[in-house]
Image (tube, rainbow, N blue to C red):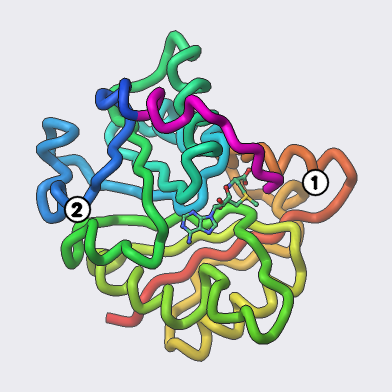
Amino acid sequence: MRLRNIPYAKEKLANHPELVILDGSVHKGAWHEVFGNSNPIAIEIGMGKGRFVIEMAKAHPAINFIGIERFDSVLVRALERGLEDPQCPPNLRFLHLDAELLTDNFADAEVTSVYLNFSDPWPKKRHAKRRLTAPQFLSRYQQILMADGYVCQKTDNMHLFESSLLSVNNYGMELLMVSLDLHNSDFEGNIMTEYEEKFAAKGQPIYRLEAKFAA
Ligand code: SAM
């Protein structure tokens, strides 16, 4: 994502604690208190401008959604979208966080699902560790996911998708779903992200996988 510095981002994020969490570590093990209920918690890592996580929260009111983004100049766009939306739901929060620090912010088994949408592909071999489906990240997801929790990835990038399939397989995860053309499949309830809409408009196939850790 092209990153334009937004000078007012930090201040605006700080002014909306009802939606934005700047320090998630204080809620580790107690995210249910943030939402005031004991519903399952789903996270999207690298939510960008937030369309997916906002629409998912609306579509699934009995699940709490946390959209995670590491850049404040991007996170503020999601916040603005949420603030402008008259139907912005109560089961939604945005968390300013680099996914490298997930386990400092979520307790073991605190999360029910992890969504990765159009993550940065990091095509160079020497950057493979930065891919959000690299084993170092899978191990963090395994720690914070409850038994039967799952990881979902969507991407337009065939190389990233291949690398993800290999990575989840080598990690011993069970693949629950693989689609090589999501938009022409019988998958129901797909919610498009900003990137997805752009790539789909160009006629590019969208890949999707869903996988869970072995018991
Ligand atoms: N998911 C959105 C979509 O599909 O439209 C945005 C995709 S954009 C290519 C990837 C986003 O992930 C960027 O906003 C980037 O800042 C964020 N991101 C990448 N690595 C991250 C990490 N380690 N932790 C949190 N966010 C990350």
Residue depicted at 62% across the width and 67% down the height: 178
The amino acid type found where label 2 is placed reads: Ser
Identify the image quadrant of residue 191: top right
Callout 1 crowding tier (Cα within 10 Å): few <14, some 14–19, many ≥20: some
Q: Report the quarter where the C terminus lies.
A: bottom left
Do the residues bearing badges 2 and 1 touch, measured as CB atoms within 8 Å? no
Q: Main secondary structure of the magenta part?
A: loop
Gap between marks 2 and 1, in whole Å? 35 Å
For mark 1, what is the residue?
199
Residue shown at the point (56%, 35%) measured from the top left: 49
Q: Please give left or right for residue 68 compared with residue 33 in the image.
A: right
Q: Is residue 195 above or below residue 83?
A: below
Most foreground residue, 162 or 46:
46
Q: Is residue 214 magenta?
A: no
Q: Percent from the top left, x then y, of residue 209?
A: 58, 65
In percent of width and height, residue 160 lies at: 68, 71
Give the total of numbered labels.
2
Above or below, comparing residue 120 to residue 165 in the picture: above
> Residue flagged by tag 1: what amino acid is it?
Phe
**In the image, is residue 114 above or below residue 31?**
below
Residue picked out by circle 2: 25
